[in-house]
Amino acid sequence: MIDLNSNHFRGKSRPTLHQISQLSDKLRRRKLVGSNQTALETALLLRVVVSNAKFKSIDELLEIVKSVGQELTNSQPKELAIGNVTRRVLRLIREEYQQALRAANLDTSEPALRMAFKTPDLYGVNSAASLGSDNSPSRSPSSAQRPSHPTNMDDFNRKSTTVMIQAIQEVIDEIETVYEQVSKNASSHIRATDVVLTFGKSKTVESFIKSAASASGGLTVYVAETAPFYTGREMVKSLSEQSGIECILIPDSSIFAIMPRITKVVLGTHAVLSNGGLISQSGSYLACAIAELHATPVICVTGQFKLSSIRDNLEENDFSSSDYVNSAKMVNYDDGNVVNNVDVAVPYYEYVKPEFISVFITNDGEFPPFTIHRLLHEEMTEDEEL
């Protein structure tokens, strides 16, 4: 890990360093909340970082990007989308640089060069040990990656940087259009005869249900109010604006009573763990457990960028208890005897077991929970294995 300074960026580096510091402060102070917005802001910042980075080898560029991602993650460890987007950008940088080397007629089959293209470990997993055990020649990876004519290094890096920025832009476009991409197949899962239950407020779920209602011509949706945050009320207001949706707000205590009428449960999520479990808003576990009892399918709609590798997965109970919110809505602070003698914990997120989920619908397709691990494994290199 390196300390970022003006030597790592071209031209006037102060604006780039200021943007990094500004986003870190927003994350630390919880002015930026939610996986979608956090992922988008992270990708936008990394595009700026790559475009302004000063590097002589691919290792230096990867180290700069990794340091920015680590700084953002340290500012807000609860936003797992930061690490997900950063690792994906690191992989794209490595792939685009490798293609540029091939275009320059360099031998990328050389063991030392192939090893140099591995994305460095973002969160301190023992990748160094695995690299040390490699039987490849002890050459410097940086020297192996350089074009055959050192005088053309700056031109080569400039051209490869342009391609890298285009690749990062594709990630940004994917995040910006995630609602439309997830919703395009909504009619295949939700029909006019279905009665849907959803929990809390999620823009992905909202877009998915609206798309299904437009295709089917009408839909009945029950929304749990999600006390004590009452985000379900916002969801009802948003869904009611769509013609053809009969939206009914119910208290959380009525979920069990209403479940026999429900044919589909649709949930959003904060993060998808590698075992197929969810980190979702508190109360989701209750809704999913009741759905399983009544053999009601549970559909989770999410963006691909919310899929998190196991290195970010905290223990189930630890994660649930790591993000407490203000308990003022639960406790009357005028009652001094209660406030002085009782600790009231109000976790914002909780863990939902993969056994409760029927299918994940993402912007890149549909996946059952047991395939999430394989999906992550296919997208990572050897030093990123779970």
Image (cartoon, grey):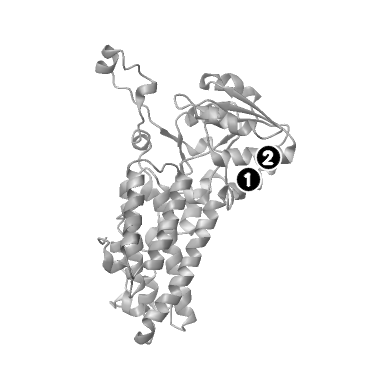
Classify residue 230 as left or right of residue 313: right
| Disc 2 crowd, CA 10 A, few/some/many (<14, 14-19, 20+) | many
Residue 132 or residue 231, whichever sits in front: 231
Circles 1 and 2, Cβ within 8 Å, touching? The answer is yes
* Image location (x, y in percent) of residue 354: 49, 39
* Image location (x, y in percent) of residue 313: 38, 45
Identify the amino acid type marked 1: Ser
Q: Is residue 264 visible?
A: no
Snapshot quadrant of residue 76: top left
Q: Is residue 15 visible?
A: yes
Classify residue 317 as left or right of residue 102: left
Residue at 33 percent of width and 64 percent of height:
64
Above or below, 204 against 197 in this view is below
Residue at 39 percent of width and 58 percent of height:
384
| Disc 1 crowd, CA 10 A, few/some/many (<14, 14-19, 20+) | many
Residue at 34 percent of width and 60 percent of height:
15
* Image location (x, y in percent) of residue 71: 31, 53
In space, the residues marked 1 and 2 are separated at their CA atoms by: 8 Å
Classify residue 246 as left or right of residue 17: right
Q: Which residue is mark 1?
A: 183
